[in-house]
Image: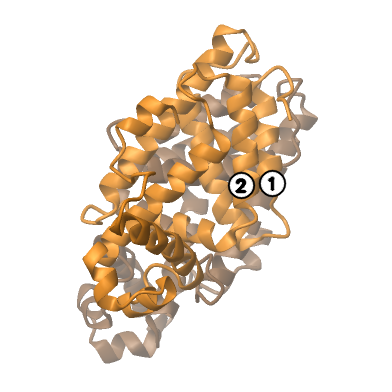
Chain colours: A brown, B orange
Amino acid sequence: MTKAQAATRPATSRNYPKGERRRAQIIKAALTAFGQVGYRHASTVQLAAACGVSRAGLLHHFPTKESLLEAVLEERELQDDQHFFRTDGDPIDGLEYFASMIRLVAHNQANPLVVSLFAVLSSEATTADHPARPYFAARYERARSQMTQAVEDLAARDLLHSHVAPSGLAVSLIALIDGLQVQWLLSPDTIDMPEHLRSMLRNVISVELPG
Amino acid sequence: MTKAQAATRPATSRNYPKGERRRAQIIKAALTAFGQVGYRHASTVQLAAACGVSRAGLLHHFPTKESLLEAVLEERELQDDQHFFRTDGDPIDGLEYFASMIRLVAHNQANPLVVSLFAVLSSEATTADHPARPYFAARYERARSQMTQAVEDLAARDLLHSHVAPSGLAVSLIALIDGLQVQWLLSPDTIDMPEHLRSMLRNVISVELPG
């Protein structure tokens, strides 16, 4: 994610004055807690205990389970972006971008509970009245926009196979990454997510990715 | 699906003696009901009413909501196979197969509630103790096996682009189809599922698909 994109994101301040530090601690603990017991089954009492605060303390920062969830989703997205897509506002290098994407998918493959949580939530969020629907719609919009820049960079540098149409490719590659999660979660010994992504990228990119 | 595969499927008899006809009616009505109110929110009372039977009548055929769900999933898979993949036991023609797959995805795009139900269920089923986990694991296994035959047919006829590795391609294409559903459900005006599938197939298949 570029700095410009970060600036348009809902506020999850990286400088933590006063109660903000506690808020950040709760979010971090909640990601683990959601990943362990799932979103649906987690009670605010359980979540408060896992986060090391009282139920009242939790509700002070997050009045509803949905609001805590949204903060957790944003924090994880921010972390992923910072660890795997540090671009410092520079134009996106398509080869670096997709190499980073493979690393992110490999990282996810070490965290089945979090992947499962995300897979369930993004699907549940497709229903009209789900509290996380706007978040996920915007998140995919951001992801498509960013990956489209990466694809356009490759196209401009003539690094796509000659018969590959760049238009719409970002949608399909994001879909591929999402869909692999379900098959991997159901058959972890059969499916290797980063290998499948790398293999599909070889079908469209004409040079080897770095790293 | 070939006849041989159908023979190994759990029994959903196509000849309905006695109570089987009622059972089939319930399954048909339940697919609509699940699609309308979702699986999680559907009560057995609601489902019985939607299916035109008493709660006791429903429970006679399906002692649990999970057992009804499983029957619904199997029925829909059977219907999809019959409408889109009638192979009559013949070897799979890769071009026909993928043309059928595009038609199936276009058909799904007319049924957002059912697609949403499936997307949520397949993700929820990834948790270790979910009643539908064995069903979905086996379903993906069948889907991969069938699509792998289609890919191998194309490879044998030299209809894949020269740089495309057939190994693992089925996993990735199934993942693509699954993943498109979430983006489409969140942004139905932006995402056209069959067009994205067709476009990705053009990246791997060197000739135009029929139909």
Residue drawn 25% across and 87% down?
A55
Residue A182 x/y as whole percent: 40, 46
Residue drawn 33% across and 80% down?
B45
**Would you call the spot at circle 1 few (<14 residues within 10 Å), some (14-19), or many (20 or more)?**
few
**Would you call the spot at circle 2 few (<14 residues within 10 Å), some (14-19), or many (20 or more)?**
some
Measured in 3D between alpha carbons, the distance from the residue under mark 1 to the one under mark 2, in whole angstroms, is 6 Å
User: What numbered label is drawn on residue A143?
Assistant: none
Tell me if label 1 and label 2 are in contact, CB under 8 Å: yes
Which residue corresponds to mark 2? A87
Quadrant assignment for the N terminus of chain B: top left
Residue B176 x/y as whole percent: 55, 40
Residue B134 x/y as whole percent: 26, 45
One can see residue A139 in this view? no
Q: Choose top left, top right, bottom left or bottom right for residue A106.
A: top left
Which residue corresponds to mark 1? A90
Residue drawn 50% across and 52% down?
A82
Element on which disc 1 rests:
loop
One can see residue A36 in this view? yes
Query: Quick one: which residue is furthest to the front in this view?
Result: B18
B54 over B80 or under it: above or below: below
